[in-house]
Amino acid sequence: MTSTLGGDIDTLRAALTGRLVTPDAPDYDEVRGVFNGDIDRRPALIARCESPADVATAVTFARAHRMEVAVRGGAHSTAGSSTVDDGLVVDLSPMNQVVVDPVARRVRVGGGALLSELDAATQEHGLAVPSGMISHTGVGGLTLGGGMGWLTPQAGLSIDNLLSARMVTADGTVLRAAPDEHPQLFWALRGGGGNFGVVTEFEFRLHEVGPLVQLGLLFWGLDQGTEVLRLARDLITRLPREFTVLIAGMNAPPEPFVPEELHFQPGYAVVIVGYGGAESHAALLDQVAGTLPPLVRFAGPIPYVALQQMMDEANAWGRHCYEKGTYLERLTDGAIEVITRQVPLRSSPLSVILFYQLDGAYCEVAEEETAFSGDRTPRLGTFIVAVCPDAEPLPADREWVRDTWRALQPHSTSIGAYVNSMTEHEDDRVRAAYGTKYDRLAQIKTVYDPDNVFRRNLNITPG
Ligand code: FAD
């Protein structure tokens, strides 16, 4: 591809402030790499953009040369949406600035920043934006799809805290979307993914968090699955706002607080994070452990930034991944039957099924207020993830993910699916995920990207 572009590459290079990386660059392989080791694509051009002007230049160049465009934030998309064979990657990673205004409780974040960068800057002031649970995820893709994590029951999704966005649209226009500027676009950005343009800067509302939070981790063996999941079900319905629970079917981590004979043993974890005092957190853990004594119990205060990084290593870059997601209204006995049947069938010790608590502040945002793909009634965001150290076990665990997802469908909510947990971009599933919001999204897409330049995503086709 680069050979047919000839001297135009030099023109583009000269027009960009950031670097243009071509396949002959010594670090090309490093720069083109994405989170999912199963994705191996070779873009013709990677424009490491440093400003909105760079983004506009790169997008305009790609269109003029009929090249496919991929937009790269944190490069975490399991589907590999942020890279493309023979096309042009708009790489936002140099745009990772984070500017905190602790008085106004607002933060401006570059479109290529990672959660770790956002957390580090905001926690200097004891503040945080609700985001995801793995700190090397990009703020960009995570936010545009919704953004759920430890703080969702207390402070909502990332998009519920989005105040404005600066972006570059498909025709190279630089604009600001906010409730009073391009309001339809601002609505679409909050859940509609990267369909509408390249966000170069997000502005979020901040919340007081930490800097220390209470972490409690309880782990039981496979044989206690049904009791654990029933216990977790009851726990979630009666939890006060100061706690968040994460439920996981996983293998015990090789951490110092886990007895060595349990390292990598399969089972179920319930993680309880407390934002209040140590006493109330310990009392809750006592209660849970008293009801069903766990094999492992760990408790103690940790920095919020450490909580955000707790699962980074298990999900390190380069692992071979595949995932599917669904929403469960609750852990019904039927769902528990499926889960306890499926959890022992994983091949890789890193593959996991996770249930995120979505209630509290999550439910205080009106359904139509954002484009988010999911109702705002209490539910469990369910991620079924194959994580393999290399390519070999992936096919088996990919099937495990698909089987588990299929078996959970009768127990899932009838509407919605979290678009950020879809690896495959099937048109009918994207439509189903957005339900009645899809047509409105398609109309907004027609206004801002009629030629579907931004299509390497959970694509909304122009209406
Ligand atoms: P990228 O691959 O860079 O981008 C993903 C998509 O977003 C692409 O289509 C890209 O074009 C678009 N995009 C990215 N940045 C921009 C931008 N600035 N402007 C326009 N378009 C952009 N989600 C959660 O909500 N909570 C979690 O706890 C969570 N944990 C995860 C853990 C793992 C291990 C993985 C693999 C994913 C997890 N996710 C989670 C899903 C995650 O939100 C999505 O994968 C998300 O798309 C990642 O964003 P990114 O910027 O890193 O990805």
Image (cartoon, grey):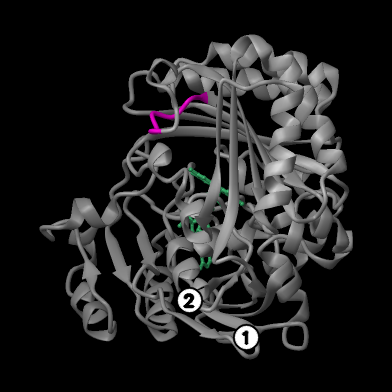
Residue 244, percent across and down?
A: 70, 48
Residue at image position (32%, 45%) is: 41
Predominant secondary structure, magenta span: loop
Can residue 382 be seen here? The reply is yes
Contact flag, marks 2 and 1 (Cβ < 8 Å): no
Quarter of the image for residue 232 reads: top right
Quarter of the image for residue 223 reads: top right
Q: Which residue is mark 1?
A: 176
- Mark 1 lies within 8 Å of ligand 1 (Cβ measured): no
**Camera-side residue: 176 or 264?**
264
Q: How would you rate the neighbour count of disc 2 (Cα within 10 Å): few for under 14, some for 14-19, many for 20 or more?
A: few
Q: CA distance from mark 2 to mark 1?
A: 28 Å
**Camera-side residue: 414 or 282?**
282
Q: Quadrant of the C terminus?
A: bottom right
Can residue 461 be seen here? The reply is no
Looking at marks 2 and 1 on the same chain, the residue that comes earlier in the sequence is marked by 2
Q: Which residue is mark 2?
A: 124
Residue 289, percent across and down?
A: 69, 28
Which region is colored magenta?
251-256
**Camera-side residue: 106 or 453?**
106
| In the image: residue 156, left or right of residue 218 | right
Is 212 located above or below residue 30 in the figure?
A: below
Residue 16, percent across and down?
A: 29, 82
Is 176 located above or below residue 399 in the figure?
A: below
Residue at image position (65%, 89%) is: 104
The kind of residue on which mark 2 rests is Glu
Please tell me whether mark 2 sits on a helix, a strand or a loop. Answer: loop
Quarter of the image for residue 260 reads: top left
